Image: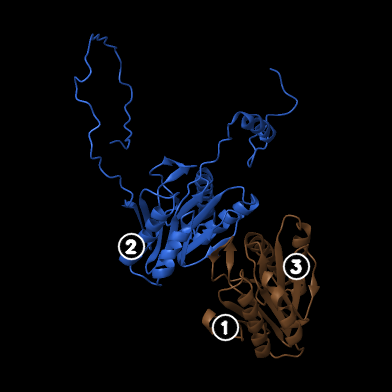
Amino acid sequence: MLLSAKPSFAPVGGFNFENVRRNAMLEEQMSGQGFKAPKARKTGTTIAGIIFKDGVILGADTRATDDMVVADKNCMKIHHIAPNIYCCGAGVAADADVITQMMSSQLQLHALSTGRAARVVTVTRLLKQMLFRYQGRIGASLIVGGYDVTGPHLYSIYPHGSFDKLPYVTMGSGSASAMAVFEDRFKPNMELEEAQRLVQDAITAGIFCDLGSGSNVDLCVISKGSVDILRPFDQPGKRGCKHGQYRYKKGTTAVLTKTVTPIAVELVEETVQRMDTE
Amino acid sequence: SFQTTIMAVEFDGGVVMGADSRTTTGAYIANRVTDKLTQIHDQIFCCRSGSAADTQAIADAVTYQLGFHSIELDEAPLVQTAANLFKEMCYKYREELMAGIIVAGWDKRRGGQVYTVPMGGMMVRQPFSIGGSGSSYIYGFVDSSYKSGMSKEECLQFTANALSLAMERDGSSGGVVRLAAISESGVERRVILGNQLPKFASC
């Protein structure tokens, strides 16, 4: 057995800059031939949250865009952090997903070691400290909302690590449209019905007025002791039905010869994945 | 980040601190009711201007360091100590940070004190201090209006007037005026809403 002088490297956390020079060189060469470097997929989003009489409501659209193409028509932007704390993520999709997962597991460990139920302010602090440490290079804008032992709380966290504690917040490319709706109709201590309609209207404003947001409205209602994930709550962007028939009748194309070769196949495993087809 | 107007004034027996409440990302106001007066210790506050992320992170770090120091000492910390902690961090990381901070409070050794720690990491005690982008518009006003020996109420009025004038002229300051008066007896906080701000003759 050949023992190396240095022991094997354990994987180090954080960013890996080994490929920076290679990428720069590739981009230089490729741009001469008209190719562009791939860009990180952003969610181009409308997310919003409000505090109402009995708790917190978080809302999000469900479109994920890759430049000008819709990459995912029904993605989930409301992430689970703890049974009573949820987080909406905007910005770079991968960053928002992974950072919420990482902080969710850290929060669970923290709750176990302190022996106390998790609090919204704890996960906010964990998230903002990590985002500040990476100086904005983790492109995740988050809205964290939950109902803990101290009551309902709502925080918005920016990619550079600043946060605001407010009764209503919006983030993402459609945030201006959603905020317009909130500024018009928000009142403290709203009832559940009215509050749900307000968040739905705010997200719908983002869906219609922002190119980067679309598809459905997802809601998450967090109150004392219960969480309701309403997915989808509303589908304002439903596709209309086609008026013409684009299918040809069987027999339109003449069949000249037909050969059948049976192949013996053993069914080992069957999984069903639904696709959105006509 | 905040382009801002912040201010602090010493009086005999304490300090008065004030700030506007606008946080902007570019041309959009991300938070129109921000609280830029952050408590560092029981009777020591700081006003934050510059990058929201940087100043929040620095304030958290100094709050921890000062709290620890105070427990070790088993008595209330000095305002100068808090100002020094801010200065150490702001000077050491001056290239990476964008933070202009005014530290003010009351301690039993020197009473009310105001220390300014602008971008770059200098620290100096002043009888009153203004900071933020909106402060450029009120240097003339505060230099001509300030009198030493003002009472707490006079200082509150002086601060409210100065901030209103700055918010009127500076696009990146606005919202409400948040005031805090710190003295031996504790901290008293006030908010002056937009329509209750002092009005001046303007064209």
Left or right of residue A110, residue A191 in this image: left
List the residue tagged with mark 3: B118
Q: Which image quarter: residue A277?
A: top left
**Labels 1 and 3 in the same subunit:** yes
**First in sequence: mark 1 or mark 3?**
3
Q: Residue at x 70, y 91 (%)?
A: B151
Colour given to chain A in the rendered image:
blue
List the residue tagged with mark 2: A197
User: Which chain gets the brown colouring?
Assistant: B
Instruction: Tell which subunit mark 3 falls on.
Output: B
Q: Outermost residue toward the front?
A: B203
List the residue tagged with mark 1: B197
Left or right of residue B14, residue A131 in this image: left
Instruction: Tell which subunit mark 2 falls on.
Output: A
What amino acid type should be assigned to the residue bearing mark 2?
Arg
Mark 1 → mark 2, Cα distance in angstroms: 35 Å
Residue nearer the viewer, A160 or A202: A202
Q: Is residue A249 above or below residue A57?
A: above
Q: Position of residue B9 (x, y in %)?
A: 71, 81
